[in-house]
Each structure stands twice: as C-alpha cells, then as structure tokens.
Image (cartoon, rainbow, N blue to C red):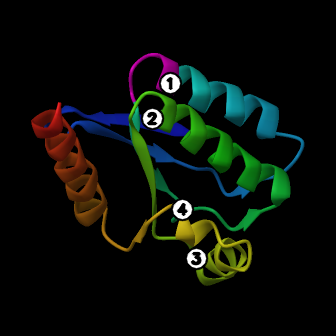
Amino acid sequence: MNFELKAEKHASVVRLPAKMVMAQTPTYRAAILDYINQGHTRLVIDMSNLEYIDSSGLSVLISARKQAMSYQGNIVLLNPKSSVRALIELTRLHHIMDIYESEEQALDNLRFSSLIEDIAS
C-alpha cells in the first residue's frame, strides 16, 4: 500500500495492493486509520491494481470512511476493476462512497468539498 499526499489538492491518494484479504486486513486497517489520525482525512482510494477484495477488505474501506468522516473528511474510490466494482455495487458501497475513473476528478471532488466546508464554517 502506498500513501501519496497531494498537498495542492488538500487530499491524499492511497494505492491499494493487488489483494485485500483477511490475512492482511488488520495491517491495512491500522495503516489507513493511522494515516487518517495524522490529519490526512480526504483520501482517494486507488483501486486500479486491486484484483481481489473480500468482505474483510471492504470492511477496511468502511472503517476508513467512518474515521475520515469523524474528522469531517471524506473518502472516494478510484478506478476499480469490473469484478471489484461489481462487489462494491452488490454491497451498495457505491451509495456511500463516490467512484471516479480519473484521479484528477476524484481529487477535484475532494478539494471542492473541502472548500465548501471552509466557507460554511
């Protein structure tokens, strides 16, 4: 897993590995939650390399979203492969996490939502 801060966009890109299965999810969950707790609350989860994810992997995404939102942040998903996207849609996660095909669009969405929150506060 690779974390890349995009400071000019007020967000970070998290690139997932090829598989997210039960054996690795405690490590992934801890790494993502720690990153969020360090103040990186707007994340683009890049799924372009992800070939397979099980229910424990999906739970990492849900936990990360919950944690980010507790800091008024947000998480969006980027470029899931068709099999992964089918699972996301089957579990209806696409109703709570936006999916983008372009990193630039995903980052712009998070930046725009950040600006709206700054104006509102």
Query: Nearer the viewer's eye, disc 1 or disc 2?
Result: 1
Q: Which badge, 1 or 3, is on the more N-terminal residue? A: 1
Alpha carbon distance from label 4 to label 1: 21 Å
Q: Are marks 3 and 4 in contact (CB under 8 Å)?
A: no
Alpha carbon distance from label 2 to label 3: 20 Å
Residue with the mark numbered 3: 81
Residue type at the position of mark 2: Phe
Alpha carbon distance from label 1 to label 2: 8 Å
- Per the rendering, the mark at residue 112 is none
Residue type at the position of mark 3: Lys
Q: Which badge, 4 or 2, is on the more N-terminal residue? A: 2
Marker count (numbered): 4
Write the start and end of the magenta stretch as one range: 36-40
Q: Which badge, 4 or 1, is on the more N-terminal residue? A: 1
Badge 2 density bin: few <14, some 14–19, many ≥20, Cα 10 Å: some
Residue with the mark numbered 2: 3
Q: Are marks 1 and 2 in contact (CB under 8 Å)?
A: yes
Q: Are marks 4 and 1 in contact (CB under 8 Å)?
A: no
Residue drawn at the location 75% of the way across and 29% of the way down: 27
Position of residue 42 measured from the top left corner of the image (x, y, whole percent) = 37, 39
Residue drawn at the location 48% of the way across and 37% of the way down: 69
Indicate the secondary structure of the residue bearing disc 3. Answer: loop
Position of residue 14 measured from the top left corner of the image (x, y, whole percent) = 47, 43
Residue with the mark numbered 4: 96
Q: Which badge, 1 or 2, is on the more N-terminal residue? A: 2
Residue with the mark numbered 1: 35
Residue type at the position of mark 4: Ile
Query: Nearer the viewer's eye, disc 3 or disc 4?
Result: 4
Badge 4 density bin: few <14, some 14–19, many ≥20, Cα 10 Å: few
